[in-house]
Image: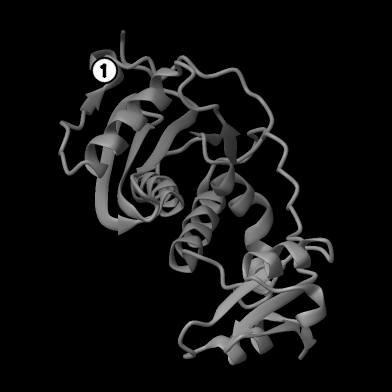
Amino acid sequence: MSDKILDFIAIYTDGACSGNPGPGGWGAIVLDSGGDVAEYGDGERGTTNNRMELSAALVALRKVAQRGQPAKQIMLFTDSTYLIRGITQWVWGWRNRGWTTAEGNEVQSRDLWEDLIRVTTEIQQNLITGGSKKIEWNYVRGHKGVPGNERCDRIAVAFSQGNKPGLFRGKLRDYSIDVLSFPELEGLPEMKPKVEKQKAHSYLSYVDGTVMRHADWASCERRVKGRSGAKFKKAMSAQEEPEILAAWGKKTSDLKND
């Protein structure tokens, strides 16, 4: 394949983690507008899959920003819905709420998200105008035979296992991976609805031969904590209470309210 001058930059990224948290790795491929290809990768001993996915995209985009090559758009391909939804939808709300989620929890990997905002902002300011989009975040389903995605997966897995694979640097004509074989674009999978945890009907405790019903776990815990031979159980319905009591050799008539 002859050298090509392109009007775009293509990036593939992937992350892997064993245990989540556990040992992880990431891999990235950058095809620049000058027809050069570079592979990147690294690993961490104690990390998460999401951090590895973020790290892959962040490092690849930093390399693009450093090169400063002219291009109308950057096409980034990833199988991480968390990464795509985070950078295109959620991150602005997180930042406005002081880096907390809509549920009030602390946003994980805030350091990487802040760095990702900075580098994407820098790139978008410097890209040639006129492209359909500047940074295009494309979802590619994992393990579907897309050459760039499969190669990034192998790099990420190798680093997660403590190995150091050889990383290519050179011209597109010398690269064995067909990174111009772009995947057929598809939308993000629908998010699974959050399943509301069923509220317990009551909490039962057994201390020194006496059984008691509690409205919440805190009061039940106070009664049983540190008491030798104490028992406790959550009842999801009124019908479940007699079954729990029977297992303790007690009847509903023995039950006292806290």
Q: Residue 52's x, y, as percent? A: 38, 49
Tag 1 residue: 175
Q: Quadrant of residue 36?
A: top left
Q: Residue at x 42, y 48 (%)?
A: 49
Q: Residue 120's x, y, as percent? A: 52, 53
Q: Residue 137's x, y, as percent? A: 58, 39
Q: Residue at x 66, y 58 (%)?
A: 90
Q: Quadrant of residue 188?
A: top right
Query: Is any part of residue 209 visible from this angle?
Result: yes
> What amino acid does circle 1 point to?
Tyr
Quick one: 133 or 175, which is closer to the camera?
A: 175
Q: Is residue 78 above or below residue 215?
A: above
Q: Is residue 224 above or below residue 147?
A: below
Q: Quadrant of residue 173?
A: top left
Near mark 1 (Cα within 10 A), the count class, few <14, some 14-19 or many ≥20, is some
Q: Residue 89's x, y, as percent? A: 68, 53
In the figure, is residue 113 to the left or right of 211? left
Q: Is residue 26 above or below residue 148?
A: below
In the figure, is residue 8 to the left or right of 221? left
Circle 1 — which element?
Answer: loop
The tally of labels here is 1
Query: Outermost residue, top direction?
Result: 1
Q: Is residue 47 above or below residue 31?
A: below
Quick one: 189 or 182, which is closer to the camera?
A: 189
Query: Is any part of residue 39 visible from this angle?
Result: no
Colouring rule applied to residues? one colour
Q: Residue at x 76, y 91 (%)?
A: 258
Quarter of the image containing the N terminus? top left
